[in-house]
Image (spheres, grey):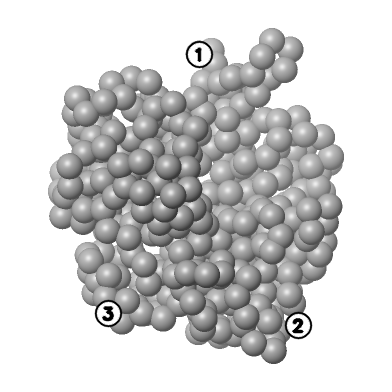
Amino acid sequence: MSLSRRSLLAAAGITLAGSLGALHAADPRAAARARAGYGPLLPDPDGLLDLPAGFTYRVLSRAGDPLRSGEGTVPANCDGMAAFAAGSDGGVRLVRNHENRPTATVRVPAVDGLTYDPAALGGCTLLGLDPAGRVTTERVALAGTAVNCAGGRTPWNTWLSCEETEDRAGTSGYARDHGYVFEVDPADPHRSGAVPLTALGRFAHEAVAVDPYRGTVYETEDAFVEPFGLFFRFLPARPLGGPGSLRAGGQLQALRVPGVPDLSVVTEPGAEFPAEWVPVPDPSAAGTPIRLQDFGPGGITHAQKLEGCYWGGNGGVHFVSSYARSAEGAAADHHGQVWFHDPARRTVRLDVVFGPAADVRLPGDSPDNICLAPDGGLMVCEDGGGAQYVFGVTPGGEVYPVARNADDIGRPGAPEFGEFAGVTFSPDGRTMYVNAYAPGTTFAVTGPWH
């Protein structure tokens, strides 16, 4: 299917072609009968978050406020996040990344037993919510890491936090190498500590997703400068082994699509290709970044801005290329792609194409973090120019607005809105949690979710 910007302007101002084929209903008429979305977004009188009628939000945490633990101040740059059940009474634990670079003004406080490199300013914080959704605890869960961007949850209910950097010890004042994935136990962060999962590779990690049946770990590399990033899979030595099992090592491989050196050249939604997996010569990138290593005569497949990654509940994994720009070295231009890898069929398929964003004041470009929506489709955080939205994408491929950032952090006459990140749902599916990256706000959104 192909949806024009004109036909969707009133709803979301986005062009989307194709459909989430792997999520598509068995009866295509079912998708046609379903009405996408929850109606137009209404202006928030408090100027924070515009939502459809019938939806409300609660601010759970705001950068600059004191942590309830007394460990310091709530850091900004709120990014990837996941929600976990806290007991059987409906309580929730939220693990939240802070994408702090060396220039951050408020660090994730260094806490004994949870700090990897005291010179690094990033990490994770943990919010505990009671059954009524009220914040009862807020504390550090991981510190001394760098540029913690996204990540992903595991089938054994831990969080994998990703460092989006390749900086070595001695760079930016760091005392240790960075570019790793760290496991965080939301029930007891001290149980997981601050141990890098080195076998998962050292590169600019963005997000991960774990196959709950095979234990394979999929990873995206966010590289916006040529040569662009790779899509990886990690085959653990102890698949589905529970907390700490990824420390046992395994094999890291990178995706090769034969004849497709750059995913940006694929423009037709529904286009499907065989997926090959090539061993990574040096996962530690001791001398050469992984994306520059020699993968043999067939080469390897790159893509600009590989970001969101999420297991789809449909036997495969979705991953996002946020954009591609030929002026920056990409083979072709696009405003966002969502791909699907089917491990059983050993294929990759282009499912959704975003853009073009003809007017930067309108949404519809640069998809980033993603998660499953209650209707079986996807929720997508936008990280483009102008207005910033959370979009839903139905199983039939229709897109609709869910939330719009109304918190203007720009100058007079030059509005600016922080990107959304970390979209996730409570275990019961009744609450959507999402971060506004700047000024650093975590929201809980409730309403008549489908």
Question: Mark 3 = which residue?
Answer: 238
Q: CA distance from mark 1 to mark 2?
A: 52 Å
Question: Mark 2 = which residue?
Answer: 259
Q: CA distance from mark 1 to mark 3?
A: 50 Å
Compare marks 1 and 3 and give the one earlier in the sequence. 1
Q: Residue at x 71, y 60 (%)?
A: 226
Question: Label 1 amino acid?
Answer: Asp
Above-or-below relation of 360 to 120: above
Question: Label 2 amino acid?
Answer: Gly
Q: Which is more toward the observer, 196 or 379?
A: 196
Left or right for 371, reference 15: left
Image spot of residue 181 (x, y percent) = 38, 59
Could you tell me if residue 441 is visible in this image? no
How would you rate the neighbour count of disc 3 (Cα within 10 Å): few for under 14, some for 14-19, many for 20 or more? some
> Which is in the foreground here, disc 1 or disc 3?
3
> Which is in the foreground here, disc 1 or disc 2?
2
Q: Which is more toward the observer, 95 or 251?
A: 251
Q: Which is more toward the observer, 63 or 394?
A: 63
Question: Mark 1 = which residue?
Answer: 46
Q: Answer with the quarter of the image where residue 342 lies.
A: bottom right
